[in-house]
Image (cartoon, rainbow, N blue to C red):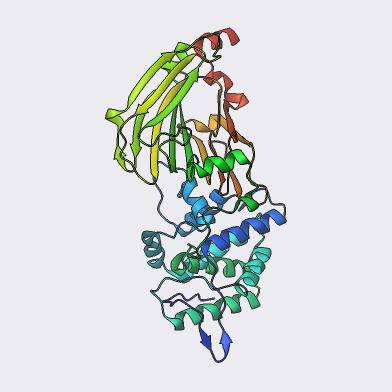
Amino acid sequence: MGVIFGKLKIGFYEKEGEMGMRHLTFSEILQTILSVNKTNNKTTGWVKQETTVNSIFQVIGVPGKADEEFYVNTSDCSKYFNGRKNIPNKIRKFIAKQPITELAEIFADKINHHPDIPATAIATALFEQAKQGEISSLISTCTDDIRYQQEQTLNQLFSKKLYAQYISTTILFSLLYVSNIDTTPSVDFPSQEILHFNSDVEECIQLGQYYKSYERDIIIYPDIETKLFKVLVTRTFEAPLPNPVHKYKDKYLVNFFYSTSTLRSNLHFVSLKINGRDYTDTTQVIDETLDRENHSFPYKRSILLENIEPANTYKVKLQTKYFASFPVRFGSFHLHAPAKRFKVSVCIRTSEKRKLSLTMKTFGSYNKHVSNIHHIEPNATLAYFENIDWTFPSSGYAYIVKPWNEYWLDFLPDREKSTET
């Protein structure tokens, strides 16, 4: 069965009184696939955002980084899934240079031979979705005639029950020509009536003490030789204040508290950027010891930047690092201010990462009236969480890294290992 792609224009194409079908966005396709697999109680195959996107790109042959396990990182997979990222032009050009007919057949063959991909159910769901709703925006590098031929091809594939070919053709066409970003205007902040804010959260938002978005990226580098975990933490957020926890508009301040001076000295400041400007060299690291009788964690370390140029919004990127001993690493965090969007990723990077397991749990209060929470754990060394609706203060996550049972001795400090043996 030949598959034809070509140049398209935005809008429905009508020929001989027939209304053309709607071409789905990559986001719609991904959401439909995951929804069908969830309905069919699938636990392997296309059941996670990251594994689905990466398996598609892998079959197509999109080049990935040599040192990375996945073609597409966690953040971009989420953006594709939620319609917040378009397919890069370099990927469109790469796919366009391939023999599309053969590529669609190869893709379909992979689907047919995958025991955990319900091709019939997915194709049916995609076909039904293409018949309803408003048309998606198409990039303006195509002609109406080729678009019409594509619609005819999809109808023929479905009528002949060539469901795997229908899926592969739909996906390839979407990657080539369909805009993945929804341009429909949206309300940035839903009303209090919808969100059911309490008075404290409402006041924080009115005072600007909230995050428009908050991202936290934790990379763990285990070192077998030193028996230490090096943990790099990157916080990236956008807010009306340099740090919504405080009311200052002219300085950035973040405080860390510890039970011992040794733990405090283990926190290392790496870098600070605000609104694209690098303030690393002018940022101060200040230590203070508080009254032990009134403070359970009296050893304080502050990161301070003064005389910040005023702005309507502040885009902040802070990096810190610390070291933790083997064999187990536990970490946790909770928000101190409400966040319109909250995202966390934790990953392990080492040549021996298959010896370690990683699990992450979330906790706290979210807007129960909107189901926009996404979890990803595509393998044992990467975990991901994102809430694209409001997350309230004291909500957060906890993770634990530990060796698999058969590799436990590899991660024990030498003195403990000698005791074990």
Q: Is residue 158 above or below residue 70?
A: below
Q: Do we see residue 289 in this rendering? A: yes
Q: The N terminus lies in which quarter of the figure?
A: bottom right
Percent position of residue 229, x then y = 47, 24
Residue 384 visible to an observer of this rendering: no
Is 313 located above or below residue 160 in the figure?
A: above
Q: Quadrant of residue 36?
A: bottom right
| Residue that lies at the very extreme toward the left in this rendered image | 281
The quadrant holding residue 331 is top right
- Quadrant in the picture for residue 249: top left
Q: Nearer the viewer, residue 245 or 33?
A: 245
The C terminus lies in quadrant: top right
Residue at x 57% of width, y 69% of height: 165
Q: Is residue 292 above or below residue 14?
A: above
Residue 247, compared with residue 205, is above or below; it is above
The residue lying at 41 percent from left, 50 percent from top is 64
Please indicate whether residue 111 sits to the left or right of residue 291 in the image: right
Relative to the observer, which residue lies in front, 371 or 34? 371
* Count of marks placed on residues: 0
Q: Position of residue 329 (x, y in %)?
A: 54, 24
307 relative to 182 in the view: left or right? left
From the top left corner, tell me how far across and down residue 10 is, in percent. Answer: 45, 76
Residue 316 position in % (x across, y down): 39, 39
The residue at the point 58 percent across, 40 percent down is 201
